[in-house]
Image (cartoon, rainbow, N blue to C red):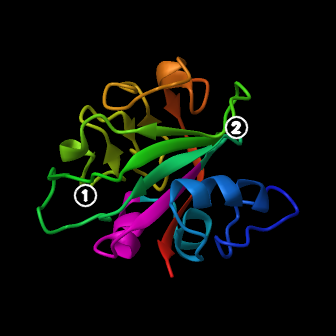
Amino acid sequence: MSESNPSAYFSNSEILTSAYDSILCEWLNAKTEWNLLYSGTRDGLTPEAFHTIVDDKGECLLVIEDEKGNIFGAYTSVGFSTRGGNGMVYRDDRHFLFTLKNPFGIAPTKFATKFPQTAFAYVRNYGPSFGDHGDLTLRGHDGHFGESHTINFPWSYVDPTGKGNIVFTGNERFSVKNMEVFLRK
């Protein structure tokens, strides 16, 4: 765990602490507990492990920590589905991206989608890809998500920070240190 105060709402997280509880509960419109479904450090930080555990489970919160300690992620009310097949784009009117900790010291920020009809794409060989133009894409092979990027951010999102594609990590490309997915209890 990155700090000493574990989260009261996101059980068993190695990334989230109580410092983020109130803002995440506000964004998710509920003070309810979430169960840890997937942990990259526990289950394997690969697209295969991610999809095997997370696909077709429904509403979820994805939290990413990069190798520099930045914390960011995405929420989807519909979850990641295999029903449409590889390359299928999904509508999600409640989807958003967020930053909790970034290299600029910007307060936690929620990024609303401009195009809910193309909120994210299911790509079996990668992790999830969010936004109409792959604004946040988790890519990897050989047992890691080392080719992830935010090259096209904020094409599909409202960015109140003005930092564009470097807001999450200070760079448009990043390597994932850990990734967690939570399901609402």
Q: Residue at x 35, y 62 (%)?
A: 77
Q: SS at mark 2? A: loop
Q: Which residue is mark 1?
A: 124
The residue most toward the bottom is 185
Q: CA distance from mark 2 to mark 1?
A: 27 Å
Circle count: 2
Magenta region: 47-64
Residue sitting at 51 percent across and 25 percent down?
160
- For this view, does 178 lie left or right of residue 4? left
| Mark 2: amino acid | Lys
Split into 4 quadrants, where in the image is the N terminus? bottom right
Front residue of 81/24: it is 24
Q: Residue 23: give x, y in percent of width and height.
A: 65, 52
**Residue 166 drawn above or below residue 65:** above
Can the viewer see residue 147? no
Residue 113 image point, x, y percent: 34, 39
Image coordinates for residue 174, horizontal then vertical, percent: 54, 34
Which residue is denoted by mark 2 in the rendering?
Answer: 68
Q: Are marks 2 and 1 in contact (CB under 8 Å)?
A: no
Residue 74 in view in this figure: yes
Residue drawn at point x = 18 percent, y = 45 percent: 117
- Label 1 environment density (alpha carbons within 10 Å; few <14, some 14–19, many ≥20): some
Q: Nearer the viewer, residue 81 or 147?
A: 81
Image quarter for residue 36? bottom right
Residue 139 coordinates in the image, percent (x, y):
39, 44
